[in-house]
Image (spheres, coloured by chain):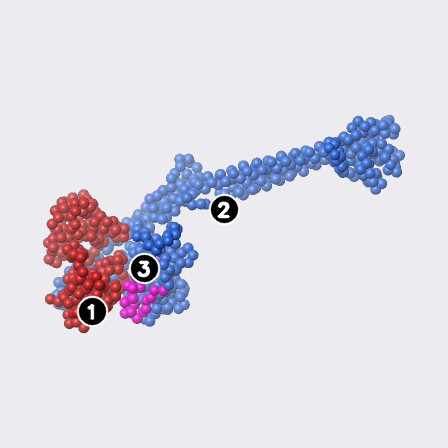
Chain colours: A blue, B red
Amino acid sequence: MRQISLWNNVSFRLMLTLTGLFYLAFLLLGGFIFTRTSTYLEREVHGLVDSVLNDAVVFVLEEAGFPELIEEINERVEADPYGASRYILLNKDCEALAGSVHIQETLRLVQQACREKMPESAWLSFSETRYGEDENSGMSFVGRLINTEGGHRLFYAHSVEQTRETRILLATTYIWGFLILLVLGGSAGIIVARVVNNRLEVINRASQYIREGNLGLRVPVSHSDDEFGRLAVNFNQMMDQIQQLMESVQSVSNSIAHDLRTPLTRLRNHLEELRSSLNDDELATERVDNALSEADQLLATFGALLRIVRLESGSTQREFMLVNLDQAIEDVVELYEPLAEETGHTVAVGTTSGEVVLADRELLFQALCNLVENALKHTAPGCQITVRNYRNGDSIKLEVADNGEGIPAEFRDKVIERFYRRDSHRGGSGNGLGLSLVHAVAKWHHGHLYLEDNSPGLKVTISLPDNLPPQPAVKTGQTPS
Amino acid sequence: MRILLIEDDKLVADYVRKGLREAGHSVDVIGDGKVGLLYAASGTYDVMVIDRMLPSMDGLAIIRTIRASENQTPVIILSALADVDERVKGLRVGGSDYLVKPFAFSELLARIEAQSRAFTAHSEETSIAVADLEINLLSRECRRGGKPVNLKDREFRLLEFLMRHAGQVVTRTMILERVWEYHFNPQTNVIDVHISRLRQKIDRNFEQPLLHTIRGAGYVIRAPD
């Protein structure tokens, strides 16, 4: 099976885009929940701090008085000196009166804030140093400094440890979720892409085989009535119609063969008979000979047309064999060299590359003959015709080049069309099918035909794909028999 | 020559019979596959011409059957199927030659006569002579009237083919098939030029030409009467 690149695969790319979008949505949602939760938790702590301070001022200070407040604070601090709460009461000179004064760094921080006249609305965030293995130390706090009666200032901070832990938990939960999603989503993407791809590939491969000439082949139809099943059914119905059309083309060409070529051959045979009964009448013999060669010309045209139709419809089945291209061009040059000499041209083998292709030997040779014949017919005496072969990357080229007058660029596509002959050549021999046949032969070999400027002259190239399977290196110079 | 023609198309059959009789051969015409096989198996023919598509039995099946019984009579297959692999198929079951319908009668006649010759010729021959023209198949030398004639390899093969069928007409298509080993019809007179080159070498400066053109049919090499 052909290895399919995942990147060249629509379903895979679609799945990738989809999962990507899904991840993005997941991340956005996660971020949103995270910020919302953090804000909420922060507000909770702020609310707690505010209500503690409010309690102290309203219920203790205003109802019981200042000494009660000091006592209450000290009591609370002593109950849990390293807990989640930090109380500090300062006088108007920012000297500590009560509270968590045993924690020097916090005290200094608060005293500094007091001296700098930190506004009541501001929040003070700080972390304490961790003392050895003490579980309760090293926590982070957030607190506020408020003014009370007589210029005294009361500070209360609450630990944000709870908030921090919740945040970390939230973040790790999300990261794990994301990783699981990444693995599951990714594999789901690949699986879906594979499934879709495999079902499409069945249809793809079938169409490739069909294109290669196995017209009777159909796509296997699964019984599930899904879109692929329907595609396969439609595809098969379309192929049925195409096959019918092809068959009718073939039957038309067969009828040309039988209904036109057969009577024409009979006519030719009658002429031959007539000729042998003429004995010594030279004038009549010459006329019959002319009629005979006209009939031969017509038969050749029908033959060429039929061959083109059959090649183009893919209905002809031929045997591929190893064709030595050097041999083929040597043969064609050798065959045409005497004729060229007679018409005043030169035909020569150009560069050879020793290339071998799997091809139909007769068709390739016929194509080369047609090209050389064309060059002989359409160039002035004295012109040079060169036949060569060479490799260009993955393709193997067969080239027939001349240094005649060439074909103007705008006519180069036209001359490939059937029966097209440039006006200046209409009087000459030939049927306007030579290049069409070459084109059909090139196409039939999955190749191309190029007409290019040889400045001066015309360069016709048959480009064939390199279709030889890679061969293991053979040390000896023996040719496979 | 005794020739068996198995062909169900009456027009073709009548025409071929008439032509062959005029050329001096005796012909039996059968229009049915099974009856044809009975005649073919009798083994008294010099050449058989068998159509591929016949009522009651396929032409290739007839050939396979008679070859299986070691009957080596040359068989020319007639067929409307022109593809090369059809030709290969026909030759593989034991056909000696393959002619695509529709065909010119002169082509069929030339091939029939070539087959009868091929059947009787001894392949161990080391030299062939026609009048005072002689070729040596081992040393690949050619002499006319004792004087050496210098031939290129392909010219020698062309001459050898003509001389192996001395006295018989060979067509341009046959020459292309046997000497160049390609099966197709060139549009130009490319073979004629090769022939005239060969003629230049073997017939020039000699009173009696040996290589003749048969208009509308092909070429023949033969000793002067």
Share a chain, discs 3 and 2? yes
**Three-letter amino acid code of the residue under disc 1:** Pro
Viewer-nearest of discs 2 and 1: 1
Q: Secondary structure at mark 2?
A: helix
Share a chain, discs 3 and 1? no
Please tell me which residue lies in front, A137 or A294: A137
A348 on left or right of B108: right
Please tell me which residue lies in front, A83 or A144: A83
Q: Residue A194: x percent and y percent?
A: 47, 40
Please tell me which residue lies in front, A272 or A368: A368
The secondary structure that dominates the magenta segment is helix
Name the residue beneath numbered marker 2.
A7
Q: Quadrant of residue A166?
A: top right
Subunit of label 2 = A
Q: Which residues are magenta?
A: A325-350
Viewer-nearest of discs 3 and 2: 3
